[in-house]
Amino acid sequence: MNILLVGSGGREHALAWKIAASPKVRRLVAAPGNPGMARQAELRDVAATDVAGLVALAHEIAADLVVIGPESAVAAGLADALAADGVPCFGPTAQAGQLESSKAFTKAFADRYGLPTSAYETCETAAAAKAALDRFTPPYVVKADGLAAGKGVVIATERAEAEAAIDDAFGGRFGAAGARVVIEEFLEGEIGSLFALCDGRDSMLFGWAQDHKRAFDGEQGPNTGGMGTYSPAPVFTPQLVGQVRERLAEPAFAGIAADGAPYRGVLFVELMATREGPKLVEFNVRFGDPECQVLMLRLESDLVPYLEACAHGRLGEMPPPVWRDEHAVCVVLAAKGYPEAPAAGGEIRGADADFGPDVVVLHAGTRRNADGTLRAAGGRVLNVCARGATLREARDRAYAATAKIDFPDGFCRTDIGWRALG
């Protein structure tokens, strides 16, 4: 079969790596892709938000399936346009995509369908948001309503910091995404990421992991799109997994269908495991980044039949996925200055080396110059991923490979997996 994969980040490289291994695939095209993905796919220079261009490309390559990677393509209505043209697609409609594209929508949705989440207020002006702080206790959680590449959340220990975050949002730091903000209660507990597939009717759990959001060791620094992750994570006990499915994932699928937008694709449930049970932090309407990377390393099953089943409404016919009895770790190499002002253009050497069968280096924000040199072209630049019989073995392999990559303008956290390993 012919598959069009949309996106260019580390998540999409992980998907390309896994999709290309499927015996069902005859041709894999990635748009726009990145230099690392060129090993698994043909690259076409069509942006993830160029809906008309992507629909045309799907027809050009006679795509049997389009796989949407990033949330920006969901919000742009790519799945809607493909459905109108009769092209099977793994990814939700723009209406269902509001579960990620609007924090205010999701909070109201959770209220409407009884999903446990934090107390909140949605504010249309800076003055209203600052007044809302009076009704919360620190730490304050300030979120830009729209898509901000994982950087629109500020957890402020002081009121002045919270008010500065409000001013930043309404002052245009996140563009239209900050036109309104959501002030939330801070949840105490341990954070986790759980994934579930849905074909519009039937659903299935599809793995879990634990991310590291802060830029620096010890959970210090600003929030990022994710600096590393590992799977499985001890926080996901069988009891917690069952609670997340029953209280969050299944009600979300039922609720969005009742709203007239049956969900097709993967739902990423970011949750806080509290003393009262799991509470929703937020939904994302795509695989996590960098959570997808460790899930693909651990997934023993062929991924493609599950993507197909979601697109064609046949997920109920599929067996549960089979996972390797191994641990996986992803270490993100980011450009210095990330997430505020990442340094661009730094040369990277050694990323294409053979680190052994249990290590995979995935590209996230890179470009290949005409002279063949690899350069940084984004905030999160490379994902160094490894498997091992234990979490410590997987982490040691990932950091050993990271140390062999020569990227003077880069940095990484050195404590991925600290919650499990100390």
Image (cartoon, rainbow, N blue to C red):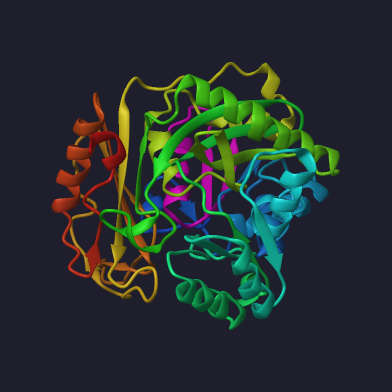
Residue under the image location 22 percent in, 38 percent down: 422
Asked whether residue 56 is in view, the answer is no
Total number of numbered labels? 0
Residue under the image location 25 percent in, 57 percent down: 412
Query: Can you give x and y, in whole percent of width and height, for residue 401 in the image?
Result: 18, 46
Asked whether residue 222 is in view, the answer is yes
Residue 54 vs residue 26, the one in the foreground: 54
Q: Is residue 264 left or right of residue 402?
A: right
Residue under the image location 67 percent in, 74 percent down: 179
Query: Can you give x and y, in whole percent of width and height, for residue 14 in the image?
Result: 42, 44
Q: Is residue 294 left or right of residue 305?
A: left
Magenta-drawn stretch contains 14: yes
Query: Can you give x and y, in whole percent of width and height, for residue 171 in the image?
Result: 58, 83
In the rendered image, the vertical position of residue 389 relative to residue 283, given as above or below: above
Residue 28 vs residue 306, the one in the foreground: 306
Q: Of all residues shown, which one is farthest toward the bottom?
A: 171
Q: Is residue 397 left or right of residue 176?
A: left
Q: Which residues are magenta?
A: 1-30
Residue 292 vs residue 104, the one in the foreground: 104
Magenta-drawn stretch contains 29: yes
Quarter of the image for residue 249 reads top right
Residue under the image location 48 percent in, 30 percent down: 22
Query: Can you give x and y, in whole percent of width and height, for residue 184 in the image?
Result: 59, 57
Say which quadrant the N terminus sits in. Answer: top right
Residue 234 vs residue 78, the one in the foreground: 234
Quarter of the image for residue 419 reads top left
Q: Is residue 255 left or right of residue 70?
A: right
